[in-house]
Image (cartoon, rainbow, N blue to C red):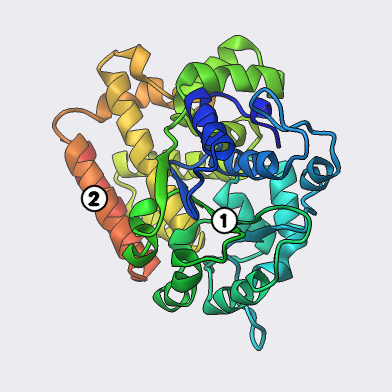
Amino acid sequence: MRFADIPGHDDIKRRLVEMADTARLPHALLLEGPSGTGKFMLARALAQYIHCENPSHGDCCATCPSCRQHETFNHIDTVFSYPVVKKAGKPAVSADYLPEFKSLLTEHPFMDPEQWVSLLQAGNTQPKIYVDEGAELTRRLNFRAHQSRYKIVLLWLPEKMNEDTANKMLKIIEEPHDDTLFLLISNNPRQILPTIYSRTQRIAVNRYDDEEVSDWLRDNMAMAPEAADSIARISSGNINEAVSLTRISKTRKMFLDLFIDLMRKAYQRKIGLLRQWSVDAASLGREQSLAFLNYCARMMRENFILNLHVSGLNYLTPDEKAFSVNFSRFINERNVLKLFDVVNDARNDIAGNANAKIVFFDLAIKTILLLKK
């Protein structure tokens, strides 16, 4: 991964190159910011630049043996560490899932966490960095660097460490070997345990602006300018989200159908049919239920804006807009905040493992009352 391969972030690229060139790299550097902003690509590019045998003009050469090894994710002095799922009777370490991780790096270089869950076939289980990973990293880092000045650990999503793992890794991050660098990449730095967070030097990687996302879509997805601009606005600077929106997404179509079904039946006060709707919605499972409720909140926001006739602020796909043009008048200043509260309460209940059928039926009944306001 070369810096030139990464869209935007020119100031951060210059800062990282300067740190490497002047030997001012901290022992633990944290790149923090929203998902889909290229943080892991920046970390990969920095690692390759440090290991490159012939760097020039602020980038690696891409042709030396070290660069070629980086391009295939096989550099001997580069260690990948990332959240995984635990299997019965086996230690939970990154190395057990290296083929899946290489697939993620190749197919989703902006590191989409949802795609990682899919590759792990984790279902409703959330990947974590377990204490076994801390022990394995300690073992591997006890060996000297083989062909480079530094061993580099690229640690993705340190917020997924539990307290035991953090305690295990604290010493090697706080007092690493003199030939070891840690590059940590976080989507949610507030969830990193303070004992780890305080030991890092931090660089904020902000979201892309809409123009940068649109340019990337046109260059990499062969999209027409108008379609690229529309998706860029919806994706909120997250290229993972933008890529997802370009695909024919069965999940997104299912969410739209469920939302339309809820709103139509709630407006018509069809309580019996809404009971069945709540059963169907509950069958999504915990994680997809939470995603669906996030989708409902977004659709309510977009319909409210559409009802205000401020088209420049609307982020709707064509299918969503086809429904919302006629429906938006029912989301107005009298009920929009209460609708948000109802969805948020349902989201909190589902996250707390409440009975999903009851939660969704309660949401449906409250929606009936609010749509009539």
Tag on residue 303?
Answer: none
Asked which quadrant contains residue 156, the reply is bottom right
332 in relation to 144, above or below: above
Q: Marks 2 and 1: in contact by CB < 8 Å? A: no
Q: Which amino acid type is shown beneath numbered disc 1? A: Leu
Of residue 201 and residue 224, the one placed in the foreground of this image is 201
Looking at the picture, how far across and down is residue 242, in whole percent?
56, 31
For the residues labelled 1 and 2, the Cα–Cα distance comes to 47 Å
* Label 1 element class: strand
Quadrant where the N terminus sits is top right
89 in relation to 47, above or below: below
Q: Please name the residue shown 32% across and 63% down the image.
A: 194
- In the picture as drawn, the residue positioned furthest to the bottom comes out as 89
Tag on residue 342?
Answer: 2
- Residue 32 seen in this snapshot: yes
Asked which quadrant contains residue 371, the reply is top left
Looking at the picture, how far across and down is residue 135, in whole percent?
58, 79
Q: Please name the residue shown 42% across and 33% down the image.
A: 206
Q: Residues within 10 Å of mark 2 (few under 14, many from 20)?
A: some
Read off the residue under disc 1: 181
Q: Which comes before the other along the chain, label 1 or label 2?
A: 1
* Label 2 element class: helix
Looking at the picture, how far across and down is residue 102, in whole percent?
74, 53
Looking at the picture, how far across and down is residue 161, in whole percent?
46, 68
- Residue 277 seen in this snapshot: no
Quadrant where the C terminus sits is top left
Q: Please name the residue shown 64% across and 82% down the image.
A: 91
